[in-house]
Amino acid sequence: MDRATLPPLAWRLIAGLAGFKLLLHLVTTGAWGSEWFVDELYFMACAEHLAWGYVDLPPLLPAVLAAVGATLGDSLLAIRLVPALAGAGLVVLAAALARELGGGRAAQATAGLCVILAPIYLVMHSFATMNALDPLFWTGCALVLARILNGGDTRLWLLFGSLAGLGVNSKHTFLLWGLAVVVGLVATPARRELGSRWIWLGGGLALLMILPNLAWVAGHGFPHLEQLANIRSHGRDVALSGLGLVAQQALLLNPPALVIWVGGLVWLLRSPAARPYRALGIAWLAVMVAIIATGGRAYYPAPAHPVLLAAGAVALERLAAAPRRRWLLPAVTTVMIAVGVVVAPIALWVLPPGLYVRYTRVVGFDQPRIENHRLGPLPQLFADRYGWREMAEEVARVYHALPPEERARASVFGQNYGQAGAVDRYRSELGLPPAISGHLTYFLWGPGEATGEVMIVLDDDRETLEELFESVELAGRVEHPYSMPYQHFDIHVCRGLKVPVDELWPRVKQYS
């Protein structure tokens, strides 16, 4: 398409939609007594130990959280500003991509609206994880590629490479999108781009940006691969068939939006008007095939979906251009909004816990399970936002009940990064020592100043502890009515470790 004939970007409309998305997440932050999500506790701990890599994530998110903490503070609202802004940014990028594909005002608005209403993005942008940032880099690269295929300056491959470098440093699964784009280029006339020196310079720039993390990963023995193998062997994740994974995409993107994203895929692959962008449709297919083949989780394809939402919005706008079909666009968007409003409380924490339970019974569905854990009254993505302060306060009660000479030598051991992260999150406020743990990157940070003379151990059984310590005392109990059941546990004060801490430490390693 001649760039001179592209429709104008509907900036005011897009800004309004993005502002709504931003406000939606900010006003629901900390709703109904919820607090930090379990992963956030770990990522905030990583932000206190900046490095070029971690067992299960690259360095970008901890660096971003550290920057936010240094400038705006580390309150819940300050940290949640990161995913909220990422969500608003995704609305802008999806609408801009629709415009780059030839979509007018209606297509741009529809693409942005699809992002706002999709339950998966309501979840992803409600707490600070790599999943909040990831779609920005996938969609940003798709937008740059579409512009290049529209006759844009080939030097834009440098921008593509920069975004790709950031994408890999955000989450390693971005490599899948990069390879899928290559497949899309090779399979279409867009392969001519491979003859440009700028695409190779862009690739070199991306490689340069990810080399420090790759060196860290290799130097630590590829720990994430070890973790993934352990997860599979333990059967933690809910297994989905290929058909089941595809079917869940319809739920995660808002059921009526099925006509948008499926229509977008058909348009990219079949329409003569979409021939210049066919590489994007093939790239999406390549991602889905790879995720299904490797047994990926239901939310793994989410960063690729804005491409189809934008393309489908363009296809719908063009289909509805005929006088007899003008009703089509408002009808589809009205149904999407109506269903989206009904589904939103399942994904966004807007109802108090008791009302949420009743609401799910009335509507007849709840969040799909992603892990094989026993649940309490709330689904995991909500339950994991409760009980952390109360847990840290119980640890503090146990710690401050120790005699002063024991407090000076005491350490706190958590079984997982949520427990250790909660202690670290509230340690300044509650006067606690830094937590130690064998879970993921906590293991690499080591035992710190722990001597084993006095150790407050969270969530372990007395029999195991008595094999390791001279004395074991039950000192506390952690429970919360809305937290995950596996986060209900005893706290023991253990004295007299029978082996040196350095000798014990390799045995506590837990990459799972």
Image (spheres, grey):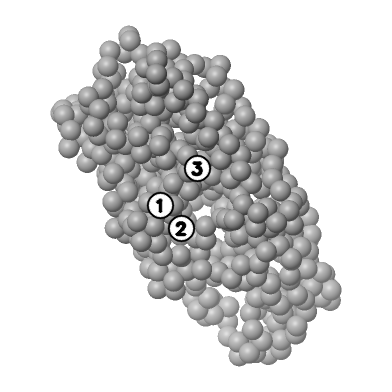
Q: Earlier in the sequence, mark 2 or mark 3?
A: 2
**Which residue is labeled 1 in the image?**
247
Task: State the mark number for residue 119.
Answer: none
Residue at (48, 48) in percent of width and height = 251
Inter-mark Cα distance, 3 to 1 = 11 Å
Of 467 and 266, which appears nearest the observer?
266
Label 2 vs label 3, nearer the camera: 3
Q: Quadrant of residue 504?
A: bottom right
- Establish if 185 lies above or below 16: below
Residue type highlighted by circle 2: Asp
Question: What crowding class fits label 2: few (fewer than 14 Cα within 10 Å), some (14-19), or many (20 or more)?
Answer: some
Identify the element where label 1 is drawn: helix
Where residue 250 sits: x, y (%)?
A: 44, 46
Q: Amino acid at mark 1?
A: Ala
**Residue 27 location, x and y as percent?**
70, 38
Residue identified by numbered label 2: 56
Residue on which disc 3 sits = 254
> Along the line of sight, which residue is nearer the eye, 297 or 469?
297
Determine whether 259 is above or below 389 in the image: above
Determine contact: label 3, label 1, CB under 8 Å. Answer: no
**Dot 1: within a 10 Å radius of its alpha carbon, few (fewer than 14), some, or many (20 or more) residues?**
some
Q: Residue furthest front?
A: 324
Describe residue 490's horizontal placement relative to residue 178 as left or right: right
Q: Earlier in the sequence, mark 1 or mark 2?
A: 2
Check disc 3 and report its element: helix, strand or loop: loop
**Which residue is at the far top?**
4
Q: Is residue 441 visible?
A: no
Residue 329 appears in the figure: yes
